[in-house]
Amino acid sequence: MQTKLTLRLDARLIRRAKAYARQAGKSVSAVVADYFALLHQEAEDVATNVPPGVRALRGALRDADVDVADYRRHLVRKYR
């Protein structure tokens, strides 16, 4: 269920947010929602003591076409 949220922001920041959203191919609402989801995830990571180095890897393979077989091939080559 989606609910409306009103934000009061500086006009310059609004222009920058709209430009960023346009460049990303998203709505400003989607950008804000993504940001809040990221904040929530980072708070969970801190609470569960996920190291910053591991946190930085999140999403690194999001668009990659990689599976377990690729990883096994990598290990075979690595440990010959």
Image: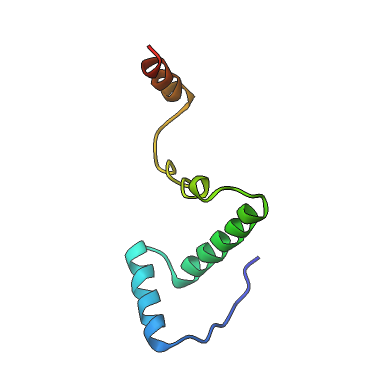
Label total for image: 0
Question: In the rendered view, does 47 fall on the left or right side of 35?
Answer: right
Question: In the rendered view, does 20 fall on the left or right side of 37?
Answer: left
Look at the image and tell me in which quarter the C terminus lies: top left
Q: Is residue 80 above or below residue 48?
A: above
Q: Quadrant of residue 78?
A: top left
Q: Quadrant of residue 28?
A: bottom left
User: Could you tell me which residue is drawn at 52 percent across and 49 percent down?
Assistant: 55
Q: Quadrant of residue 44?
A: bottom right
Q: Is residue 42 above or below residue 5?
A: above
User: Could you tell me which residue is drawn at 50 percent across and 71 percent down?
Assistant: 29
Please state the horizontal and vertical placement of residue 23, each as a whole percent of the image.
Answer: 32, 66
Q: Nearer the viewer, residue 64 or 40?
A: 40
User: Could you tell me which residue is drawn at 39 percent across and 22 percent down?
Assistant: 74
Look at the image and tell me in which quarter the N terminus lies: bottom right
Please state the horizontal and vertical placement of residue 27, each as a whole percent of the image.
Answer: 43, 69
- Colour basis: rainbow
Q: Nearer the viewer, residue 66 or 41?
A: 41
Please state the horizontal and vertical placement of residue 36, each as a whole percent of the image.
Answer: 56, 66
User: Could you tell me which residue is drawn at 56 percent across and 48 percent down?
Assistant: 51
Q: Is residue 58 above or below residue 18?
A: above
